């Protein structure tokens, strides 16, 4: 499966740390708010098929942060809550605009500003990306409310 930039995992961490991921009671769909809380993305699943209407999934064909966050919350992808907490309260939308969609630069600025152990976090997130590549699931464009 096509994977996106590792920085999408940082965005998923933020969504989890900020409580912006809500899985429904039937465990068949979730809503994930954007970091500026202006949009709500829909993620749903039927068996091993996941649908999402976030921009990365819909337009680029790789799992965007809403899908990654849901997979983490479901226990399908590894999640260290203490690492996720390091990324709380970040407005990725604003940062990504400021850094002209250079996700690596946006993430580097956060890590520097917060004094985070960049190498340790990079190793952890690369392992998550590897796990994502190995998952036996299908990703499709989702239809849902924005």
Image (spheres, rainbow, N blue to C red):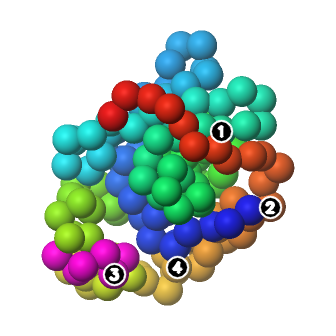
Q: Which residue is mark 1?
A: 50
Q: Nearer the viewer, mark 2 or mark 3?
A: 3
Q: Which residue is mark 4?
A: 122
* Mark before the other along the chain sequence, 2 or 4: 4
Q: Which residue is mark 2?
A: 134
Q: Is residue 70 visible?
A: no
Q: Within the magenta stretch, is there residue 134?
A: no
Vertical placement of residue 128 versus 69, above or below: below
Q: Nearer the viewer, residue 19 or 31?
A: 31
Q: Which mark is residue 132?
A: none
The magenta stretch is 98-103
Q: In the visual, does 100 lie left or right of 127?
A: left
* Mark before the other along the chain sequence, 2 or 1: 1
Using the numbered discs, state the Cα–Cα distance from disc 2 to disc 1 in whole angstroms.
15 Å
* Mark before the other along the chain sequence, 4 or 3: 3
At 74% across and 62% down in the image, what residue appears? Answer: 1
Vertical placement of residue 75 versus 60, above or below: above
Q: Position of residue 76 (x, y in %)?
A: 70, 45
Q: Is residue 37 visible?
A: yes
Q: Nearer the viewer, mark 1 or mark 4?
A: 1
Prevalent SS, magenta region: loop
Using the numbered discs, state the Cα–Cα distance from disc 1 to disc 4 in whole angstroms.
26 Å
Q: Nearer the viewer, mark 4 or mark 3?
A: 3
Using the numbered discs, state the Cα–Cα distance from disc 1 to disc 3 in whole angstroms.
27 Å
Vertical placement of residue 8 versus 142, above or below: below
Q: Position of residue 111 (x, y in %)?
A: 31, 78
At 51% across and 50% down in the image, what residue appears? Answer: 58
Q: Nearer the viewer, residue 120 or 134?
A: 134
Q: Secondary structure at mark 2?
A: helix
Q: Which residue is mark 3?
A: 102
Q: Secondary structure at mark 3?
A: loop
Q: Quadrant of the C terminus?
A: top left
């Amino acid at each position: 499966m096509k994977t996106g930039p590792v920085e999408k995992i940082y965005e998923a961490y933020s969504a989890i740390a900020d409580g912006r991921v809500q899985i429904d009671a039937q465990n068949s769909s979730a809503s994930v708010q954007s970091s500026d809380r202006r949009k709500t993305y829909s993620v749903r699943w039927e068996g091993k098929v996941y649908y999402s209407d976030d921009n990365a999934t819909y337009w680029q064909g790789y799992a965007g942060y809403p899908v990654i966050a849901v997979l983490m919350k479901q226990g399908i992808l590894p999640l260290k809550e203490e690492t996720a907490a390091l990324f709380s309260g970040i407005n990725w939308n604003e940062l990504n605009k400021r850094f002209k969609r250079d996700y690596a630069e946006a993430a580097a600025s956060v890590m520097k500003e917060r004094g985070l152990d960049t190498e340790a976090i990079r190793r952890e997130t690369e392992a998550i990306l590897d796990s994502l590549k190995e998952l036996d699931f299908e990703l499709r464009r989702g239809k849902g409310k924005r």
